[in-house]
Amino acid sequence: MTESSAPPAAASEVAAPAHKYKVRKPQQRACDEKDEKGQVCCGHLKRWYEYTPEVEAVVGRNAEIYRCENCKTLYRPNPKEMPRSYTQRF
C-alpha cells in the first residue's frame, strides 16, 4: 500500500473569524456593519447574556454586550453613555 502525500482535509480548511467587535455609537439601536456588497445590515441590536467562553475571554465576565440579530456582530457599550445594566430609569 502506498501512502498519500496529500494533507488531510481538516488542515486545508481556513478557520472563519470568531466574532467582529465594535463600539456602539450614542443611542445606536441598529447594526451599521456593511456586507461584501456594501449594503448596511440594519439588524436590531439585542442584549446578549449567554455568550460563549471565547467571547467571555475577550470582553470579561458579566459584561454588557449587544449582538446584531442578523450578522451576529458584537457591540460593546459606548463609554460616553451611562451603562444600561442595573440602573432604574423613570
Image (cartoon, rainbow, N blue to C red):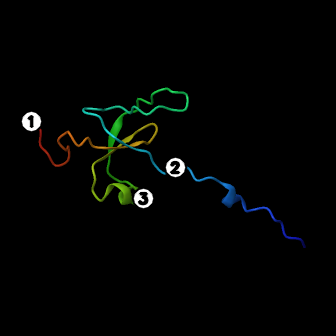
- Res 54 label: 3
In the displayed structure image, the side of residue 79 where residue 30 appears, left or right: right
Earlier in the chain: of badge 2 and badge 1, it is 2
- Residue at x 37%, y 60% (from the top left corner): 57
> What kind of residue is marked 3?
Glu
Circle 1 sits on which residue?
Answer: 90
CB atoms of marks 2 and 1 within 8 Å: no
Numbered disc in front, either 2 or 1: 2
Q: Quadrant of the C terminus?
A: top left
For the residues labelled 3 and 2, the Cα–Cα distance comes to: 12 Å
For the residues labelled 2 and 1, the Cα–Cα distance comes to: 41 Å
Circle 2 sits on which residue?
Answer: 17
Residue 22 sits above or below residue 12 on the image: above
Spot occupied by residue 70 in the image (x, y as percentages of width and height):
45, 36
Query: Residue lying furthest bottom in this view?
Result: 1
Earlier in the chain: of badge 3 and badge 2, it is 2
- Residue at x 19%, y 39% (from the top left corner): 81
Earlier in the chain: of badge 3 and badge 1, it is 3
In the displayed structure image, the side of residue 65 where residue 81 appears, left or right: left
In the displayed structure image, the side of residue 90 where residue 42 appears, left or right: right
SS at circle 1:
loop
